[in-house]
Image (tube, rainbow, N blue to C red):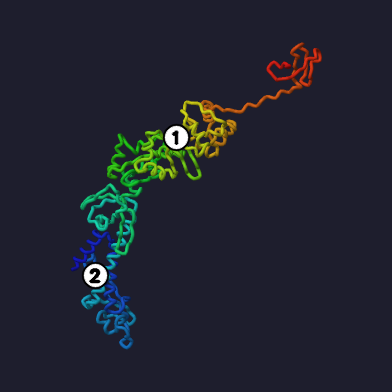
């Protein structure tokens, strides 16, 4: 019997993951509950386990009193009775004497068993809850057990997980015994016990897959800006690296696309696009509409995050995607409302003349000269060859128009942007190569009092205030020409 107790304790430790201390405390509480049921109190009871848990003993502590002072036999013992256990006992001493568990009636034993079971259930649930709560957000592998009401129950070893239909990918079909890799999405203590909710549809599931398959993401050499999904169909992942020598998209795709193929296979064929994140919203929107090639992006309303992407005719269906999935995911990835049109569609839309005017310059070939009505009609970001770092520097200084740039001298431009003079000169060269500034010519007003004129007949010097030549009397009229000659 003693060895059975030791074996039971070892089994609870190994199978349930319950600590030795908790098991001992639970058994102790059960015995104290039985003692209390029998004697009405457990304040004077002591439980002691033998070495290596080869047994357990219960003792009752009683205060020694004179025979006439004995009032409570549970807490007190007469001197004569006490000396039957210890010859040197004296009044006031506290004596411990063993209690035979056989004295416990059936009801007391049942209380002990119920207490033990309930305590072990609570401990087991709390232990499992703590264990799986610490794993929330991590991947786990389990096996399909059964299905009920579109919920798959997954064997996770120590506990059973639930895999709701809404967290399953539409492409995936499971059968009994199938291996399932999923995200521990939620861990909760439900009314019916521990509840572990699994998911394969959330973006976090893809994040963990990427960390598993791509070492650069795991060690933060490449960082994920954002992930958006249409589970079962397409996922877009915006990535970036703080190191200039790392191509974040190339590293994620891997040699011959091997890394992205492995992830797509785990997602049962779901397409995955790796997008390079860019602080410039125009470039980021261009990237986000991949695999479509975007000619240009025009910001319609920066405050409302509204933009227009212009594509070639053959790229329109690719940019929009099947059932609009590609452009919808791009909208969510960039957090912009993106409209996609061909050049012809856009130019036929006469709702905004100013935007059409801007489009005229945007659609020109990079090698062609942009002729503007004035400097303010061209953005610095519309010029070919402008680097992202230049645009960011000037955007932070609230300088986005060519007109603003040309209105400042080189030193002031370098000061407000933090760019070196070499970069300022390079930008000026780009402007000179691509923009012809058309300015209104002001008619030169001639000061008639400072100019000399001659009579067309006799050559006598005359002035514009004369009606006739003082020499020959011919009538004069004045038209300002290059030869400054008076006319008849």
Label 2 SS: strand
Badge 1, how many Cα within 10 Å: few under 14, some, many 20+? some
Question: Where is residue 217 drawn, in percent x and y?
Answer: 36, 42
Q: Which residue is mark 2?
A: 56
Residue 113 shown left or right of residue 247 in the figure: left
Tell which of 233 and 108 is nearer to you: 233
Work out whether 206 lies above or below 253: below
Classify mark 2: residues with Cα within 10 Å, few (<14), some (14-19) or many (20+).
some
Q: Do we see residue 393 in this rendering?
A: no
Question: Distance between the Cα atoms at labels 2 and 1?
Answer: 82 Å
Q: Disc 2 vs disc 1: which is toward the camera?
A: 1
Where is residue 331? Give x, y as percent.
41, 44
Q: Is residue 147 visible?
A: yes
Q: Position of residue 26 (x, y in %)?
A: 28, 67
Question: In this rendering, would 398 be left or right of 76?
Answer: right
Query: Residue drawn 49% across and 32% down?
Result: 360
Query: Helix or strand or loop: what does disc 1 sit on?
Result: strand
Q: Is residue 396 above or below residue 33?
A: above
Q: Which residue is mark 1?
A: 296
Which residue is painted at 28% across and 47% down in the image?
A: 171
The answer to whether marks 2 and 1 mark residues whose Cβ atoms lie closer than 8 Å is no
Query: Is 384 placed left or right of 162 in the picture?
Result: right
**Which quarter of the image is occupied by the C terminus?**
top right
Look at the image and tell me in which quarter the N terminus lies.
bottom left
């Amino acid at each position: 019997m003693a060895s059975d107790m030791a074996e039971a304790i070892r089994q609870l430790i190994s199978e349930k993951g319950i600590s030795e201390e908790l098991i001992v405390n639970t058994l102790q509480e059960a015995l104290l509950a039985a003692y209390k049921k029998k004697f009405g109190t457990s304040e004077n009871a002591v439980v002691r386990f033998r070495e290596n848990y080869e047994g357990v003993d219960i003792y009752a502590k009683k205060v020694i009193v004179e025979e006439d002072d004995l009032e409570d036999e549970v807490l007190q013992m007469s001197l004569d009775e006490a000396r039957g256990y210890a010859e040197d006992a004296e009044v006031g001493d506290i004596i411990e004497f063993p209690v035979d568990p056989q004295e416990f009636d059936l009801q007391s034993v049942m209380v002990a068993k119920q207490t033990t079971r309930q305590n072990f259930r609570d401990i087991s649930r709390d232990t499992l809850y703590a264990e799986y709560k610490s794993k929330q957000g991590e991947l786990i592998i389990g096996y399909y057990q059964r299905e009920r009401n579109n919920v798959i129950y997954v064997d996770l070893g120590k506990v059973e997980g639930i895999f709701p239909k809404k967290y399953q990918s539409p492409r995936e079909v499971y059968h009994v015994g199938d291996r399932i890799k999923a995200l521990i999405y939620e861990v909760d203590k439900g009314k019916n016990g521990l509840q572990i909710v699994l998911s394969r549809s959330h973006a976090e599931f893809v994040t963990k897959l990427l960390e598993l398959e791509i070492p650069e993401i795991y060690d933060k050499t490449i960082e994920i800006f954002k992930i958006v999904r249409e589970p079962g169909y397409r996922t877009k992942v915006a990535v970036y690296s703080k190191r200039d020598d790392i191509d974040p998209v190339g590293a994620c795709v891997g040699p011959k696309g091997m890394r992205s193929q492995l992830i797509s296979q785990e997602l049962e064929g779901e397409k995955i696009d790796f997008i390079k994140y860019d602080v410039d919203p125009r470039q980021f929107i261009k990237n986000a509409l991949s695999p479509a090639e975007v000619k240009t992006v025009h910001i319609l309303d920066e405050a409302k995050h509204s933009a227009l992407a212009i594509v070639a005719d053959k790229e329109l269906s690719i940019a929009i995607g099947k059932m609009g999935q590609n452009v919808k995911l791009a909208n969510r990835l960039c957090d912009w409302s993106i409209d996609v049109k061909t050049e012809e569609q856009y130019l036929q839309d006469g709702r905004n003349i100013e935007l059409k005017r801007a489009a005229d310059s945007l659609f020109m070939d990079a090698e062609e000269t942009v002729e503007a009505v004035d400097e303010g009609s061209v953005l610095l970001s519309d010029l070919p060859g402008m680097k992202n770092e230049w645009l960011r520097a000037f955007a932070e200084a609230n300088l986005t128009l060519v007109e603003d740039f040309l209105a400042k001298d080189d030193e002031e431009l370098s000061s407000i942007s933090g760019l070196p003079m070499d970069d300022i000169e390079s930008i000026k060269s780009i402007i000179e190569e691509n923009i012809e500034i058309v300015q209104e010519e002001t008619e030169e007003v001639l000061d008639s009092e400072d100019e000399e004129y001659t009579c067309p007949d006799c050559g006598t010097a005359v002035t514009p205030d004369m009606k006739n030549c003082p020499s020959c009397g011919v009538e004069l009229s004045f038209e300002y020409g290059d030869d400054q000659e008076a006319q008849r």
